[in-house]
Amino acid sequence: MEAVIGVLVIVIVVFAIVTLLRSIRIVPQQRMDVVERLGKYKRTLNPGLNVLVPFVDAVRSKVDMREQVVSFPPQPVITSDNLVVSIDTVLYFKVVDPVRATYEISNFLQAIEQLTVTTLRNVIGSLDLERALTSREEINRHLSTVLDETTGRWGIKVTRVEIKAIEPPPSIRDSMEKQMRAERERRATILNAEGHKQAQILTAEGEKQAAVLRADGDRQSRILQAEGQAKAIRTVFDAIHQANPSQKVLAYQYLQALPQIANGSANKVWIVPTELSKALEGLGGALGGLANMAGDVPATTVNAAEVEREAAAAAQSAADAAAQVDEQVRVAEAQVSGDPDRTAALPAPDPIPPSAALGGADYNGSQVQRDHA
């Protein structure tokens, strides 16, 4: 009897424990449980401690209220230009109404996947490959709009749809790589050409500026040289006028310049001026009356013999120079006439005696007559 009573007590205790466990339900955060009473929806349990009627109330589904991410496997899609591409999509959604998510559709995740695939095929089918590859934002926006409108009655909110990858066929990928390589080479060639063009432009501008600067420097140099020469000529001219030299000194300087004029290697024709005799006579008179050059006042320290020797040497040099010049004139006349034998036919000019240069002989060097026959 006592054994029966003990067994009965144990059964009662176990039943009470089971009843207590079934009547108490703890729901975690971000989860909601749908409760049915005798097979009919009764209420939704919120997070925290909840009490149920034992053996009458039952939890139908446990719905996660957090945002979920689902990655669908690649789906083959045909574009408008009849190319098959594989597209991977990623879907972000969350349950906003656990009751409708439980009773409106049996498996909302599978329904969302199929709806995404069909919508994606409709969208990609209206685009060619080039536009499909460059219109991901447009495709994502269209998918999000269609899925949100359809899943709204299921108590599900589609927050975002992303296309993870679009894989064209291998042959198309090879063609695209070749196209991109050619495009990069074209851009590189254009950039090189533009750089070469800019370099040539800069070089030309630099050369232009350098030429302008050189020309300006040369102009300034010529101006300065001309100004220097003008100042030098003016200074010499002023010095000559201030010194007031006599005609005898000028004649002497003229005779000293004759050998330098005759020694030029390019002098083929040299015209003997008619004033040569007068210059020689003036030189003779100047050397003869050298004592009267300085204001016609004789110097007490003049050496007559030394002056005579210098005058004779100068006269001899002038006579030699005049003979050389006359010889060059004869050669030039023969070359102009075209007769190579005329040089030998022309009579040699009479030499200018030094005494004529000194003014002691009656000689007129400007009256030399030649027979040009």
Image (spheres, rainbow, N blue to C red):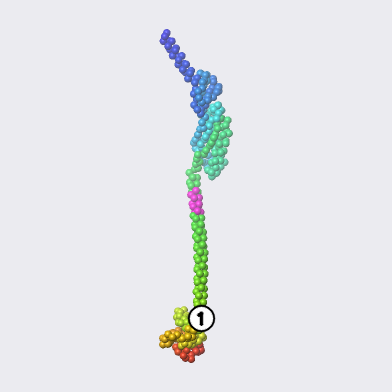
Q: How crowded is mark 1: few (under 14 residues within 10 Å), some or many (20 or more)?
A: few
- Residue 136 seen in render: yes
Q: Which residue lies furthest to the bottom in this view?
A: 362
Q: Residue furthest top?
A: 1
Image quarter hosting the N terminus: top left
* Figure label count: 1
**Of the residues shown, which amino acid type is indicated by label 1?**
Asn
Q: Position of residue 97 (x, y in %)?
A: 55, 28
In this rendered view, identify the residue nearer to me: 244 or 325: 244
Q: Characterize the magenta stretch by its predominant secondary structure.
A: helix
Q: Which residue is drawn at 50% across and 72% down?
A: 228
Q: Position of residue 176 (x, y in %)?
A: 50, 46
Q: Residue at x 55, y 22 (%)?
A: 42
| Residue 190 on the magenta span | yes
Q: Where is residue 127 in the image (x, y as percent from the top left)?
A: 56, 42
Q: Mark 1 points at which residue?
A: 244
In this rendered view, identify the residue nearer to me: 224 or 269: 224
Instruction: Place residue 139 in its image quadrant.
Output: top right
Q: What element carries label 1?
A: loop
Q: Residue at x 56, y 38 (%)?
A: 141
Q: Where is residue 94 in the image (x, y as percent from the top left)?
A: 53, 32
- Residue 337 seen in render: no
| Residue 305 on the magenta span | no
In this rendered view, identify the residue nearer to me: 201 or 303: 303
Q: Report the magenta residues as a range.
A: 180-191
Q: Residue furthest front?
A: 300
